[in-house]
């Protein structure tokens, strides 16, 4: 095509020099919250000891209110909103952006929060396989009225490297396990506290027990489409989420705000360590 408009990023191959803007990108970190991804970009600016002040970083997507995007050195930090539809739109345009910018050997990370399954709050989960509601490592995409099933296996080498980084940090508990991706926060995750609930407490616990037996250690709402799109496009990727609660013990997030803020920083600290090691900034 003569021009490729990345509409939700407010970028275009005709109006922006994408190779010049993004060609040196080696790491892309995405997360749901715009504020969190701005904070991560500022954190990486400080960790990589870049010139200028972290507070002065600019939102590259300021022409739209759909997503935010910050670039600090070879790191892109982008928000993706909540749920499969929102992150899938972002991923389509991100992968095209990386292609147009002629980026090579890029690693993608999803940084997020989740509900733990049999884990203490604050535990960080590095995803082995992203699984659906039936605990299968697949993502079903409807294309022209037909269901296309794609694998959701993530890069094993990156996951092991992240686990090694966690053992070097020794700041918080970290495990590798399967991550279940659901279509919503309430019924899809077996919560009893939504506006609608058609099952009992015991039925909820039985479903969570089955999930645990299938290797599921946390639940969120984006991992399957993230893993499947990265796999189909040949991009190495990892999902790193912190558990805010143990779903066997309840449905509502009751930890104090300051504790939750520290929990949410844990995936950022782990991925920052990975990036700094790859860049040779630490031994």
Image (cartoon, rainbow, N blue to C red):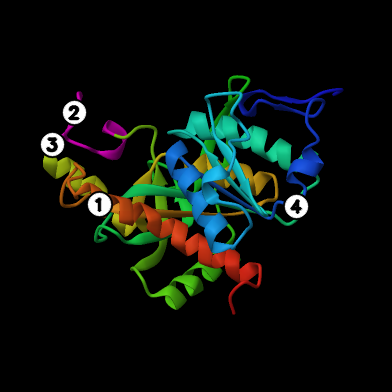
Magenta residue span: 186-200
Q: Which of the image's four quarters has the C terminus?
A: bottom right
**Residue position for label 2:** 197
Q: Position of residue 8 (x, y in %)?
A: 61, 25
**Residue position for label 4:** 24
Q: How far apart are the two marked residues, 1 and 2, measured between alpha carbons?
A: 31 Å
- Contact between labelled residues 1 and 3, with CB atoms less than 8 Å apart: no
Q: Position of residue 97 (x, y in %)?
A: 72, 37
Q: Residues within 10 Å of mark 4 (few under 14, many from 20)?
A: some
Q: Residues within 10 Å of mark 1 (few under 14, many from 20)?
A: few
Could you tell which of marks 3 and 1 lies nearer the N-terminus? Answer: 3
- In the foreground, 229 or 137: 229
Query: Does residue 166 appear left or right of residue 92 in this picture?
Result: left
Residue 258's disc is 1
- Contact between labelled residues 2 and 1, with CB atoms less than 8 Å apart: no
Could you tell which of marks 4 and 1 lies nearer the N-terminus? Answer: 4
Marks counted in the figure total 4
Extreme residue toward the front, this view: 52
**Residue position for label 3:** 200
Could you tell which of marks 1 and 2 lies nearer the N-terminus? Answer: 2
Q: Under tag 3, what secondary structure?
A: loop
Q: Which of the image's four quarters has the N terminus?
A: top right
Q: Under tag 2, what secondary structure?
A: loop
């Amino acid at each position: 095509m003569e021009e490729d408009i990345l509409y939700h990023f407010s970028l275009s191959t005709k109006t922006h020099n994408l190779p010049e803007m993004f060609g040196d990108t080696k790491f892309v970190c995405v997360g749901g919250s715009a504020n969190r991804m701005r904070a991560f970009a500022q954190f990486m600016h400080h960790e990589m000891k870049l010139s200028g002040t972290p507070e002065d970083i600019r939102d590259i997507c300021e022409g739209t209110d759909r997503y935010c995007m910050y670039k600090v050195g070879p790191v892109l930090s982008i928000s993706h909103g909540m749920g499969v539809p929102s992150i899938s739109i972002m991923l389509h345009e991100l992968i095209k952006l990386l292609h147009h910018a002629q980026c090579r050997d890029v690693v993608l990370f999803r940084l997020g929060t989740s509900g733990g399954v049999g884990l203490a709050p604050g535990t960080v989960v590095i995803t082995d396989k992203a699984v659906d509601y039936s605990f299968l490592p697949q993502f079903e995409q409807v294309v022209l009225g037909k269901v296309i099933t794609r694998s959701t296996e993530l890069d094993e080498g990156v996951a092991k490297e992240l686990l090694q980084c966690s053992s070097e940090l020794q700041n918080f508990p970290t495990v590798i396990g399967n991550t279940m991706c659901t279509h919503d926060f309430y019924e899809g995750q077996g919560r009893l506290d939504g506006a609608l609930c058609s099952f009992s407490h015991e039925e909820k616990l039985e479903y969570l027990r089955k999930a645990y037996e299938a290797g599921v250690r946390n639940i969120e709402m984006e991992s399957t489409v993230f893993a499947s799109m990265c796999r189909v496009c040949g991009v190495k990727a990892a999902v790193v989420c912190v558990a805010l609660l143990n779903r066997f013990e309840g449905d509502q997030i009751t930890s104090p705000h300051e504790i939750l803020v520290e929990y949410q920083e844990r995936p950022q600290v782990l991925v920052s360590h990975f990036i700094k090691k790859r860049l040779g900034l630490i031994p």
